[in-house]
Amino acid sequence: MIKSQVLIYDADCRLCAILARWLSKADVLHRITWTPYQNLEVPPSGLSWDDLKRSAYLVGIG
């Protein structure tokens, strides 16, 4: 199955990391890729690094 969504979150935010880990376990169909923004080389189109530091984003791919 091709994943069509990427949830980008702040891995340095303890609450964000805990929620991402918990929610990824609830994603039993594995439809979402969970990615800390710190692992990205460039921000997704339309977002800045400051945006990614302030909020989590669910980004569609493909």
Image (cartoon, rainbow, N blue to C red):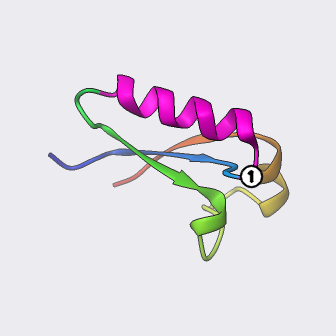
Which is nearer the eye, 18 or 43?
18
* Residue appearing at x 70%, y 49% in the figure: 10
* Residue appearing at x 49%, y 27% in the figure: 22
* Residue appearing at x 54%, y 36% in the figure: 20
Relative image position of residue 53 (x, y in whole percent): 80, 51
Name the residue type under label 1: Asp
Q: Report the label total.
A: 1
User: Which SS type dominates the magenta stretch?
Assistant: helix
Relative image position of residue 54 (x, y in whole percent): 83, 44
- For the N terminus, the quadrant is top left
Judge whether 58 appears above or below 33 on screen. above
Q: Could you say which quadrant of the image residue 57 lies in?
A: top right
Relative image position of residue 31 (x, y in whole percent): 30, 37
The residue at which mark 1 appears reads as 12
Which is nearer the eye, 58 or 45?
58
Say left or right for 4 vs 57.
left
Which is nearer the eye, 15 or 43?
15
The part of the chain drawn in magenta is 12-27
Magenta stretch encompasses residue 23: yes
Relative image position of residue 15 (x, y in whole percent): 71, 32
Judge whether 50 appears above or below 16 on screen. below
Q: Element type at marker 1?
A: loop
